[in-house]
């Protein structure tokens, strides 16, 4: 039986080393959930990095990892500490991530990191090739593995390969600054199908292919060597049912079964019934517009002082990539801003910002989503943003307002949200006021439309549509003749 091989930088497992003991649990991230239907189907294999370096694992532990991931239909790619420094922290997160999010000033072009990126993509290719059989389909994910489709196609020309980019593809004017632009595009073109979240990213990619590689592009098809490559947009959704049902269960839960956070939130609501909660959740990343959000909140409190003690911002920032200097600086800036604004406005009974720097369990996220009157999501650049979708899914009573940056891919499908420009504090302050004062019927109307759309285009459907399209490109795929 033919199988599907899924490849992503991280495996859908959280593997930790705790005093020489391995702790392994399934991860609950968007991709892991999204690919569940594909991965659970018959014969499939997921290839990725375990999250631990070769230096951290002695021989017995390495075997334990190997066997444990095998049980989950996974295979791990082994990376050294140096690989992680240069490929993951270096090229992936100091070059591609900032460049593709339009942060040119944060982008470093280090030759050593580029060499490591090539080497590690080859390591992934070796594991894929070792496991591939005729007729298998491969689905590669995200910016850490842009060269992988080309490396696989070179060795296994008859394999059908799909690639999905989870972050934005930048405009040609940004992409052209990249020293290794031809190699990256050629690597991506090893695929038979290339997927993006939005039509804009797809259009930017096609424009770079035309202008840099000078290839023929007809609508969304590229002629490359003897092959036709299809490019399309597939906006990623969420597991709508999971969030909606969890919120329903949460609301009907008797008070004594409530979690600690929920009890604290209940206390807060009882103590200050007129204080509304505004929620933001993201990884602590400079693309998420966290300083802008805090400053815009300050601007709001200055402009509309009647809201002092009537509103509170709950800001959850999940630690991320903390070895990269820009993330350390952002952490410092965020801490200082929160401190300054709380110092400026707090009263004996009210702190304007509740700030959490940690990751929280799923149930606690549901507590926060269901307690918040407004979701305040203001990235300066974001491939999609699934938090916006999760918030909407948890609004079982159809109340609540979503404020969403127009720079997030999700904004393209969520025009019923209140869309803002994350750099326009005046507009954000006015929109926040509008959200807090929005009549119930209008909240219901907006949330209902959004919910219907999210329920229909769930993450399961996203994966199925991609696979359907990839299977249909098989017909277009002729035997690839390497140059
Ligand atoms: C984004 C990327 C993913 C990445 C995730 C977490 O969503 O598109 O590829 O896995 O961030 O980042 P990390 O660097 O911790 O894997």
Image (cartoon, rainbow, N blue to C red):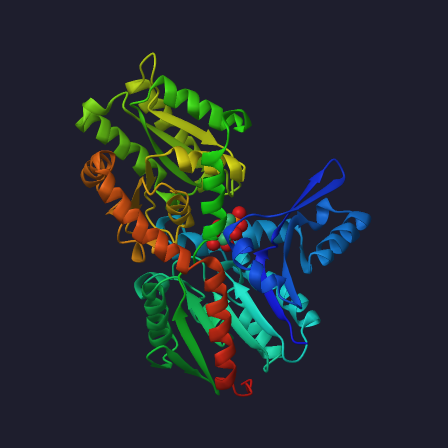
Query: Residue 83 placed where, x, y %?
Result: 62, 54
Query: Nearest the camera: 428 or 152?
Result: 428
**Residue pictured at 35% horizontal, 20% vertical:** 351
The spot of residue 304 in percent (x, y) is: 18, 27
In the image, 105: left or right of 430? right
Q: In this view, does 226 lie to the left or right of 425?
A: right
Residue 155: x and y, percent? 62, 78
The quarter holding residue 398 reads top left
Residue 71, percent from left and from top: 73, 56
Residue situated in front as seen by the camera: 440 or 314: 440
Q: Can residue 29 be seen in this view?
A: yes
Q: Report the front residue among 281 and 438.
A: 438
Residue found at x 53% / y 62%? 145
Looking at the image, can residue 330 be seen? Answer: no
Quarter placement of the N terminus: bottom right
Q: Horizontally, is 208 left or right of 186 in the view?
A: left
- Residue 232: which quarter of the image? bottom left
Can you name the residue that lies furthest to the top here? 348
Residue at 49%, 73% in the rendered image = 468
Q: Residue at x 34, y 39 (%)?
A: 375
Q: In this view, does 457 lie above or below 316?
A: below
Q: Which of 267 and 123 is in front in this view?
A: 267
Q: Is residue 92 above or below residue 138?
A: above
């Amino acid at each position: 039986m033919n199988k599907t091989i899924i490849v992503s930088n991280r495996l859908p497992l959280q593997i930790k080393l705790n005093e020489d003991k391995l702790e392994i649990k399934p991860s609950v991230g968007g991709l892991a959930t999204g690919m569940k239907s594909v991965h659970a189907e018959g014969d499939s294999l997921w290839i990725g990095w375990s999250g631990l370096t070769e230096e951290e694992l002695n021989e017995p532990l390495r075997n334990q990892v190997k066997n444990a991931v095998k049980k989950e239909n996974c295979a791990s790619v082994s990376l050294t500490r140096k690989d992680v420094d240069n490929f993951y922290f270096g090229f992936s997160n100091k070059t591609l991530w900032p460049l593709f999010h339009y942060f040119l000033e944060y982008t470093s072009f280090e030759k050593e990191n580029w060499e490591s990126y090539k080497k590690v993509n080859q390591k992934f290719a070796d594991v894929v090739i070792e496991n591939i059989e005729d007729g298998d389909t491969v689905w590669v994910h995200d910016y850490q593995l842009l060269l992988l489709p080309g490396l696989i196609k070179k060795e296994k020309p008859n394999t059908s390969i799909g690639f999905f980019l989870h972050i934005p593809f930048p405009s040609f004017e940004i992409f052209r600054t990249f020293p290794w632009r031809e190699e990256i595009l050629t690597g991506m073109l090893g695929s038979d199908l290339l997927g993006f979240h939005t039509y804009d990213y797809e259009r930017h990619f096609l424009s770079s292919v035309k202008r840099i590689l000078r290839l023929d592009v007809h609508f969304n098809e590229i002629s490359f060597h003897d092959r036709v490559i299809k490019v399309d947009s597939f906006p990623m959704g969420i597991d709508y049912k999971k969030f909606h049902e969890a919120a329903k269960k949460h609301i009907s839960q008797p008070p004594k079964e409530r979690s600690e956070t929920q009890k604290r939130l209940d206390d807060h609501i009882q103590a200050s019934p007129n204080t509304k909660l505004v929620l933001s959740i993201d990884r602590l990343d400079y693309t998420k517009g966290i300083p802008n959000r805090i400053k815009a909140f300050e601007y709001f409190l200055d402009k509309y002082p009647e809201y002092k003690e009537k509103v509170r911002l709950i800001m959850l920032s999940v630690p991320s990539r903390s070895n990269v200097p820009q993330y350390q600086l952002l952490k410092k800036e965020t801490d200082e801003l929160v401190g300054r604004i709380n110092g400026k406005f707090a009263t004996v009974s009210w702190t304007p910002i509740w700030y959490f720097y940690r990751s929280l369990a799923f149930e606690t996220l549901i507590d926060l989503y269901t307690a918040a009157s407004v979701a305040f999501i203001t990235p300066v650049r974001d491939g999609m943003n699934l938090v916006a979708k999760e918030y909407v899914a948890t609004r079982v009573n159809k109340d609540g307002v979503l404020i969403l940056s127009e720079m997030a891919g999700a904004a393209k499908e969520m025009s019923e949200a209140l869309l803002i420009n994350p750099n326009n504090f005046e507009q954000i302050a006015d929109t926040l006021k509008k959200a807090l004062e929005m009549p119930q019927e209008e909240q219901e109307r907006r949330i209902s439309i959004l919910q219907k759309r999210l329920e229909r285009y769930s993450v399961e459907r996203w994966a199925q549509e991609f696979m359907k399209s990839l299977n249909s490109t098989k017909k277009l795929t002729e035997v690839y003749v390497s140059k």
